Image (cartoon, rainbow, N blue to C red):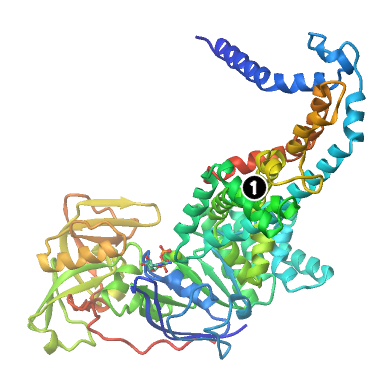
Amino acid sequence: MGRGASKALWAIAGVLIIVYTLFPVAWIVSLSFKKGSDVQNQQFFPTEWSWENYKTVLDSGLFTSALRNSIGISLISTVVSVTLATFAAYAIARLEFSGKKLVLSMALAIAMFPTISLVPPLFDLWRTLGLYDTWIGLIIPYMSFTLPLSIWTLSAFFREIPWEMEQAAQVDGATPWQAFRKVIVPLAAPGVFTAAILTFFFAWNDFVFGISLTASDAARPVPAALAFFTGESFFTEPTAAIAAAAVVVTIPVIVLVLLFQRKIVAGLTSGAVKG
Amino acid sequence: MAAISLKNIVKRYGDGYPAVNDVSLDIADGEFMILVGPSGCGKSTLLRMIVGLEDITSGDLSIGGRRVNELAPRERKLAMVFQNYALYPHLTVYENIAFPLRLAKQPDETVREKVEKVAELLELKEHLHRKPSQLSGGQRQRVAMGRAIVREAEAFLFDEPLSNLDAKLRGQMRTEISRLQRRLGTTTVYVTHDQTEAMTLGDRVAVLRKGVLQQCATPRELYEHPVNLFVAGFIGAPPMNLLPATVTNGKVELPFCTVPIPSGIDPAAAEGKLLVAGLRPGHFEDAAYVDAAKRNRGQTFEATVDVTEWLGNEQYAYVPYESPEEIRAQVDALATELDMEAMRPQLIISLDPASRIKEGRPAQFWVDTSRMHLFNPQTGNNLAGQREPDTQPA
Ligand SMILES: Nc1ncnc2c1ncn2[C@@H]1O[C@H](COP(=O)(O)OP(=O)(O)OP(=O)(O)O)[C@@H](O)[C@H]1O
Ligand SMILES: [Mg+2]
């Protein structure tokens, strides 16, 4: 087989994968532009492109408050979780303390826990503690599920940074904190970005906690709110509106990925190869 | 600038093995001190204890007369150049050099002035806005030096700064470091396992073996009066010839000739013993090329050359000989310790490059017996004992 042929095969395979993954997205986008009963037009494209569904969604109090909740909760979880993970990972990478292995394997065990199994106990616990239907009530489980992965990613990163970097900084006159902030953190930036984005996605996309630990607008995030959309509309099935809402919540994700694409790629590979 | 004084310094790592054992050393203000020894002998450990990156198990370290055992690295005001430079990859060359100044919160104007002065000195001007990853090895090395000399440090510490460079660049940088140190006059401790660096750079050289200080003296003193077999074998390239020697009737019997016992050694004490004689390749010569003035300091003998190597400005001849098992085992053990190949016993002779001695034929050689050393094969000590150490240079 010639090089040309194998190249063509790769191209075809690539296109197939792209079509396979992007088709549902394209479908949702096209659906979101269908007006009224156009949803049943039995074709891919809308007969008439319309922003109506977006208007409906953004005017609905249910959706905007959910969007606010989602953004707030995801951002706070990300910042707190990544900050904690950075310190924890640094300690794990640099310090010799007893029980280090235990901490790491516990973290991994937590990450492997099926989320759904935690819902009933958390539900009861949160109701007793008054955390039910609050932002904190969601931030805590998001953090506990994202911390392990962040710690693992970041400690791999810190291990790659030679000890001598900090030692040089200390000899140059830095306090340990200055050495960490001015040398180690900038060097670990790709890892921090990776961890931050993974955490943000987890919180942003979560449905299970979002639907079971909230009861009202006070804390309900978008994925959960979408499920309640159905009940709000009396005259038509709100399929198109839900599609529009889905597009709105996907946009931040896409923007984030495009913005940090190069950093993520650097992050995901640079830990793997000794450089 | 300051004097550094080490008193009975010991370092034990977690496993209890003393990496540095009872080392005492006085480094004068402005002195260039070399720490040398084979791999794993504790050079880096000693240096890192001085700079504060490694705790001192016991002993006293003082800098400028002040005990600093417990001080953090930043409080010791020393500058260090690491073996792999440890440049900050996310900062430009300018910011790398400026880093210590920024930490000291110096105003931008002062920082710029100082960095530019250093860049000028080290010929880094065109590279100030590049990142370390875009520089060659020699340039990185100079950036690391720049970062060290940009502030007024009490002393410079170098951990094998040239070992990552190729031979040619190493020679160049060696001269540069030497020039720089003389110019700045800053106390310097320099770790290396390179012979040439050790001999050419330092005012004094401290030889370490398994964490124990063997000898600290000027390069010339080390070369001419090594206190023991280890120092004798370590200093000098090609290495000193270590020959079996038996003392009978006040004369030393070597494999090729019998020579008088050197002055300074008590013939009675050495009588009848099997010793190791140390003779440098340069102490031999083709008998035809010896100055008349020198001739009666030594003695001629006949031997058959196995191989000769002509290098243009020097020439070496190799002469195999038999050695008793006892001495051979000692010499082989020493070679292994010095990271050299244990070889069958052969004499290395440095000849005049004009000499036409033929391989495989007997020839007349001359040896300067007045410069012969005798070592005790068991303890390794030089029978001539330790001479008075040289006075420290001011
Ligand atoms: N962190 C450590 N823990 C335990 N032992 C150590 C540690 N660092 C060094 N050692 C041991 O201490 C001894 C001296 O090490 P050191 O790094 O000072 O040697 P060195 O003379 O600098 O060698 P090289 O020329 O290879 O750099 C070695 O035997 C080494 O195994
Ligand atoms: Mg070393």
Q: Amino acid at mark 1?
A: Ala
Q: How many numbered markers are drawn?
A: 1
Mark 1, residue position: A195
Q: Is residue B254 left or right of residue B358?
A: left
Residue A11, image quadrant = top right
Residue in the image at 49% along x and 74% along y? B54
Is residue B20 left or right of A104 when viewed as pictured?
A: left
Q: Position of residue A55 (x, y in %)?
A: 92, 29
Q: Confirm if mark 1 falls within 8 A of ligand 1.
A: no
Tell me the quarter of the picture where residue A91 sits.
Answer: bottom right
Residue A147 coordinates in the image, percent (x, y)? 60, 52
Front in this rendered view, residue B357 or B122: B122
> Residue B112: x percent and y percent?
80, 65
Q: Nearer the viewer, residue A145 or A15?
A: A145
| In the rendered image, the vertical position of residue A8 relative to residue B11, given as above or below | above
Please tell me which residue is depicted at 30% across the width and 86% down the height of the picture.
Answer: B386
Q: Is residue A274 left or right of residue B110?
A: left
Dot 1, crowdedness within 10 Å: few (<14), some or many (≥20)? many
Can residue A3 be seen here? The reply is: yes
Q: Position of residue B142 (x, y in %)?
A: 63, 60
Viewed as shown, does residue B281 lie left or right of A4? Answer: left
Q: Which chain does the residue under circle 1 lie in?
A: A
Is B3 rendered above or below residue B253?
Answer: below
> In the image, is residue B160 above or below residue B298?
above
Give me the residue at 49% from left, 58% from top: A103
Quarter of the image for the N terminus of chain B: give it. bottom right
Residue B167, can we see it? no
Q: Nearer the viewer, residue A40 or A123?
A: A123
Where is the C terminus of chain B found, in terms of image quarters? bottom right
Q: Secondary structure at mark 1?
A: helix
Using the image as rendered, state which of residue A119 and residue B8 is in the foreground.
A119
The quadrant of the rendered image in which ligand 1 is seen is bottom left
